[in-house]
Image (spheres, rainbow, N blue to C red):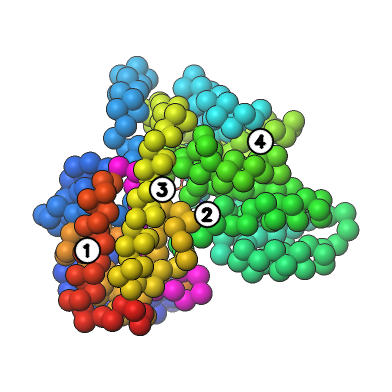
Amino acid sequence: MDLFDKFDPLIAQKSSLPFEKADPFKVVMEKVLSETVAIIDGRETILAGTNNYMGMTFNEEAIAAAKEALDNYGTGTTGSRVLNGTYSGHKGLEKTIADFYGMDHCMVFSTGYQANLGMISTLAGVDDYVIIDADSHASIYDGCAMGNATIVRFKHNDIESMEKRLKRLPEGVGKLVVVESLYSMLGDAAPLKELLETAKKYGCTTLVDEAHSMGFCGEKGRGLCEELGVEHLADFIVGTFSKSVGTVGGYCVSNHPKFDVLRLVCRPYMFTASLPPSVVASATAAIKALERSGNRRAHLWENARRLHSGLKAAGFTLATETATSPIIAVCLPDPLIATKFWEKLLLNGVYVNMALPPATPAGYNLMRVSVCAQHTTEQIDEITRRFIATAEELGLNVKAA
Ligand code: PMP
């Protein structure tokens, strides 16, 4: 028995996809020229699928801070946060984030994935219930599995479905409701106010994953909870540095008085090396810059609206009625067309994410575009033009998609 036998169907499925010149799972950025342009397979390509929403990867203050930290502290900490891996930079970053949210506590993790894994598995144990949206990110599902809590799923963004399930839970058990604010595949927004109010009505603890909304939702860029005025209903807010912050890492903020005990019990925090000092320094500088990036936020939303309306006017079917986020998901009729479309679009100089079932909700075949605040208006229009040209080359009647 070869332990790899179970992957045979996947290997067969993958090799049946008709790529000729490019494989969406093997894209190599040969040179990164800016936040929005890279050389891929020798060609200059507009990046429209990077989650680099606020374009912080080349922020001058973040780069300068990282270089200084490299010189002063070296390339890595070589240890866990609970042993030798806490430098003054880690404490400074946690204070910066706690201040940014106006909350008492912050814990920084080595990735956003680990932040969800750690928070959920530590908060909700074997006797507890985690109530989650069915379209939750893998890190949320994995956090539930790691903690051995009972998972209760409700229909995506459906308050009635959530309430029905909350009503059925036994008395006196621990209940953690976990929701995202903007969903990564379709870019749709959660009805956070109603979801959190319902969770509170049933005495649940709440955790909101703001991975795809931090940086550009809300006046200060704290996320959708800020924008909707419901931060007081979120007991824990989780976020990542790998999108709007432009580097890598994750965090959780909270006002819970016993929060700090998590540093002694949260395994994905304790049993891994802490972030390198240069990453910590660039994240700190980027978050400080984000707080005063009102103009950049406004331009990002202009870009999102312009691309959404341009693609819609061209006849593409989009996953959301309006530009609810910088994620614009273009729906194509089947996986085969999606595969060909993705490849042709790349050859036409635009990189987006191809997302197919089972990785997508409700069987969508998506060209997932994520817009960047550093895209110029000309680049946005160019992306639209190249989408149209690609559809024409494939003889696609996009209106029928
Ligand atoms: N939560 C959500 C909703 C995400 O989409 C992601 C990353 N795609 C994460 C958490 C994990 O973030 P990271 O890249 O920092 O591990």
- Say which of 296 and 198 sits in front: 296
* Residue, disc 4: 254
Of the two numbered discs 2 and 4 in the rendering, the one whose residue sits closer to the viewer: 2
113 on left or right of 118: left
- Which amino acid, by three-letter code, is at mark 1? Arg
For mark 2, give the secondary structure: loop
Q: Earlier in the sequence, mark 2 or mark 4?
A: 2
Element type where label 3 sits in the image: helix
Check disc 2 and report the residue beneath it.
182
- Furthest residue in direction right, as rendered: 171
For the residues labelled 3 and 4, the Cα–Cα distance comes to 28 Å
Q: Locate the C terminus by quadrant.
A: bottom left
Find the magenta span and give its range.
360-374
Which residue has dot 1 on it? 385
Instruction: Kindly give the residue lying farthest to the top in the view shown.
Output: 72
C-beta proximity under 8 Å, tags 3 and 2: no
Q: Is residue 115 visible?
A: no
C-alpha gap between disc 3 and disc 2: 14 Å
Disc 4 crowd rating (10 Å Cα; few below 14, some 14-19, many 20+) is: many
Q: Are marks 4 and 1 in contact (CB under 8 Å)?
A: no
Write down the residue under mark 3.
301
State which quadrant residue 99 falls in. Answer: top right
